[in-house]
Image (cartoon, rainbow, N blue to C red):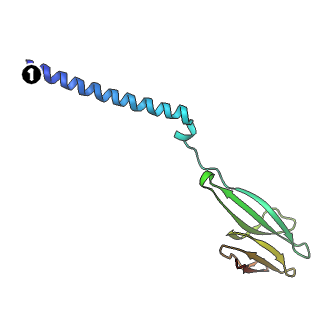
Amino acid sequence: MTGRRALARVGQRIVNSALRMIALAIAVGLLAVVILGPGWAFAGPAEPPTREVTERQPSPSGRYVADVVHVSGGGAAGFQFQELRLRRARSESGVLVAERLYGVVVAWRGDDCLEVAFDEGTPGREDVDGVAIRYLRRSR
């Protein structure tokens, strides 16, 4: 009988020790939520990037508008780049011509030719709705 009682006491101590560890883990988790805020523990979906038109260049006839858009997001380890959109003058939606460009400057060379100078990035489409798009990478 003494052996069984000793074994039961050891088993009870192990169970009590495990319950204490579980309670400690729950307490630490709740404390982290209280200190760091619920957003840390229950992060929701990422915010969509912000887009801001930084330059609008109408074509000489006014038929088209080239919009240079600054895109940024991603929080602390964020990102930013420029994209180029081409649209008809009376429309708010346009066609994405190029994205992930840096240092973009646009200039019209006639009503059917748009010149895009940029520092870094990859050129995009070369023709949109009959408008030729020429890319010029500037040297540093």
Please tell me whether residue 13 is drawn above or below residue 139 in the rendered image. above
**Which corner quadrant of the image does residue 15 belong to?**
top left
Badge 1 is on which residue?
3
Which residue shows up at 87% across the image and 65% down it?
90
Please tell me whether residue 101 is drawn above or below residue 41 in the rendered image. below
Tell me if mark 1 has few (under 14), some (14-19) or many (20+) residues whose alpha carbon lies within 10 angstroms of its own: few
Apparent side of residue 132 relative to residue 80 in the rendered image (left or right): right
Q: Whole-percent x and y of residue 30?
A: 48, 31
Count of marks overlaid on the render: 1
Apparent side of residue 1 relative to residue 124 in the rendered image (left or right): left
User: In which quadrant is the C terminus drawn?
Assistant: bottom right
Q: Which residue lies furthest to the right in this view?
A: 61
Which residue shows up at 73% across the image and 80% down it?
135
Which residue shows up at 57% across the image and 39% down it?
39
Q: Please, what is the three-letter code of the amino acid marked with disc 1? A: Gly
**Which corner quadrant of the image does residue 138 belong to?**
bottom right
Residue 122 or 96: which is nearer the viewer? Answer: 122
Label 1 residue SS: helix
User: In which quadrant is the N terminus drawn?
Assistant: top left
Q: Whole-percent x and y of residue 95?
A: 74, 69
Which residue shows up at 73% across the image and 70% down it?
103
Q: Whole-percent x and y of residue 52?
A: 77, 58
Apparent side of residue 52 relative to residue 40 in the rendered image (left or right): right
Q: Whole-percent x and y of residue 58?
A: 87, 71
**Which corner quadrant of the image does residue 50 belong to?**
bottom right
